[in-house]
Amino acid sequence: MDTRGDYQKVPASTPAETERTRNRKVYVPKVDIIETADGMVMYADIPGADEKTVEVTLEKSVLTIRSTIVPQNFAGRSICYAEYDVGDYERSFTVSDEVDRDRIEAVVKNGVLKLILHKVPQVVAKKIAVRTE
């Protein structure tokens, strides 16, 4: 049974708002979402991120990606040209009930965060034997 195509982009009715306590630029990472047979895979571009600087949380139905990137200092050198600026990254998604919240996986490599969201296993109908007493 092919259940692909069940996901839709729906704007959040109440966006998650947080109060910033740091005076830094905040970027919204670009994210690619790929649907697979058993769930979804999300790729978020977070230049400079590693496993120590990325935080992924799931509260109620809101999946939030946060990362604080520390600027690199080069001894005796200064950057004369940079492709991207350094700051914090933050993005939130509303997760449907079809996602198994206990099996979300997160891996970061070379500034790309990969999130694997598995679907909840479908309940299979079970026939219950009826007997007499």
Image: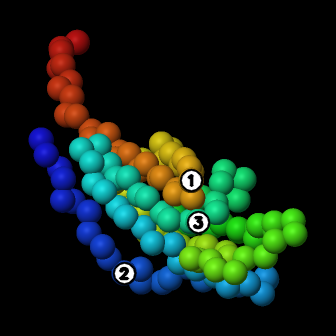
The quadrant where residue 49 appears: bottom right
The front one of 78 and 126 is 78
Q: Which residue is mark 3?
A: 47
Residue under label 2: 11
What is the count of numbered marks? 3
Which element type, helix, strand or loop, lies under badge 3?
loop
Q: Which numbered disc flags the more N-terminal residue, 2 or 3?
A: 2
Q: Residues within 10 Å of mark 3 (few under 14, many from 20)?
A: some
Which residue sits at x=65%, y=54%?
Answer: 50
The mark found on residue 129 in the picture is none
How far separated are the C-alphas under marks 2 and 1?
30 Å
Residue 30 in picture, x, y percent from top left: 45, 72
Q: Which residue is mark 1?
A: 110
At label 2, which amino acid type do we have? Pro
Percent across and percent down for residue 34 are: 31, 57
Q: CA distance from mark 2 to mark 3?
A: 26 Å
The amino acid beneath tag 1 is: Asn
Query: Can residue 62 be seen in the rendering of this structure?
Result: no
User: Earlier along the polypeptide chain: callout 2 or callout 1?
Assistant: 2
